Amino acid sequence: MKLPQNRILSGGWKCALLLAGVALGSVPAMHAAAAAGTPEAAGFSSERLQRLDTVVQAQIDQKHMAGAVVYIARDGKPVHFRGYGLQEIETGKTMPTDAIFRIASMSKALTTTAIMMLYEEGKFMLHDPVAKFIPAFAKSSVAVPPPAGSPPDVKFVLVPAKRPIQIRDLLTHTAGLTYGDGLAVDLYKQANVYGWYFADKNESIATVIDRLATLPLHGQPGETWQYGFSLDVLGRVVEVASGMPLDQFFQQRIFGPLKMVDSGFFLPPEKAARLAPVYGYEKGELTLRENSAKTDYIQGPRKCFSGGAGVLSTTSDYARFLQMLLNGGELDGVRLLGPKSVELMHANHTGEKYMRDSSAFGLGFWVDNDLGFFGELGTEGAYGWGSAYFPQYVVDPKEKIVAMLMTQLKPAGGLDLNQKFKVMMYQALIDSRSAK
């Protein structure tokens, strides 16, 4: 690992970074990637992949982040699988490729897959009302601005929802649910249903979702894209429709069959040493925010299974899940979904309601259906999402690529490595199938 010239590092960082450099080229996963063939054999340039290494390492050298793992595979074979920097700054422990991460909103694709599995079993239609499974949503109301001339302390008035929330609304984030932000924010805070973090709750997801259903929506169902609790609600739908707690459904129907051996909602204490601490970059400083010695994912109540943001996983485990999606619902002879269901998942379901990372949103992730709108390197038809802790993933059906950046950084202080990583991955691709 080459450090920037004329840069003076503190003794602890200098020693730790040198140790990270020694480990960088020696992790077993890199031997596995080499055995699978050279990057050139998969259509990538080794020299150009080094540019990605340089960009990631620069963020670590500048103390913007502690460490990261990058994974790139094509046709199901690893092209680039590498740990950078440190898992723990305080001990100088290098970042291993089997580090366990809080994946937050990358949990959403897992819950979407669970819903689609039950859909394929005939449990419901996607246009069915969610109240079929959670009766508390039968009569939703919507918070709207008060009429002109209302008293200053009146922040909103309630109107009836024009129609019931459908399962498809939840899959596309058009159900009117935020993470509590909006006109009725005070009610959400009072009800302790505010924000995406559920690991500290000493109650079941059923209890939380029933309480959520009593609160006003912040948009009419089907009319507006709003990011929020939708996938947590769907996690509860999975429980009701399957008759299984969400953690058991994930283990028996997704993690077990896909051999995702380190994935779950909470972590066994014996795996604590592999849980990457959370660091935050704010006001030019990188500081420790959460470590395994004090985290709800090990010492907490272990009761509330958040389908929207509650899963822990490794790069290898999540790569197996994404590869299953890329393969049309199957991996190593195990089929979770039919190809037509996966096709439906990365269609544009929101028209022009979603205009953010791309101009389309599918069932659980953005979809790049207009390369010009996206405005960065990519492929039409690719899809992906990220996490509050800064990771990002991409699944590219045309190029047959799965790519991920994994780390634990919150807040990220405006850094853009999680977006730049995708550009650096694509610029290293020299044999493009979609461009032919």
Image (cartoon, rainbow, N blue to C red):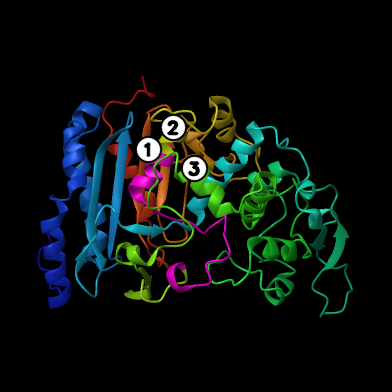
On screen, 245 above or below 195?
above
Name the residue rendered at 84%, 53% in the picture.
Answer: 138
Q: Is residue 217 visible?
A: yes
Q: Residues within 10 Å of mark 3 (few under 14, many from 20)?
A: many
Residue numbers of the magenta segment: 297-321
Please say if the residues under marks 2 and 1 sit with CB atoms less than 8 Å apart.
yes
In the picture of the structure, the residue carrying the numbered disc 2 is 326
Q: Is residue 401 left or right of residue 355?
A: left
In the picture of the structure, the residue carrying the numbered disc 1 is 402
Q: Is residue 276 visible?
A: no
Name the residue rendered at 49%, 72% in the picture.
Answer: 300
Report the quarter where the N terminus lies.
Answer: bottom left
CA gap, disc 3 to disc 1?
A: 18 Å
CA gap, disc 2 to disc 1?
A: 8 Å
The disc label shown at residue 354, or none: none
Q: Residues within 10 Å of mark 1 (few under 14, many from 20)?
A: many
User: What x and y, as percent, mark residue 318?
Assistant: 40, 46
Q: Amino acid at mark 3?
A: Ile
In the picture of the structure, the residue carrying the numbered disc 3 is 254
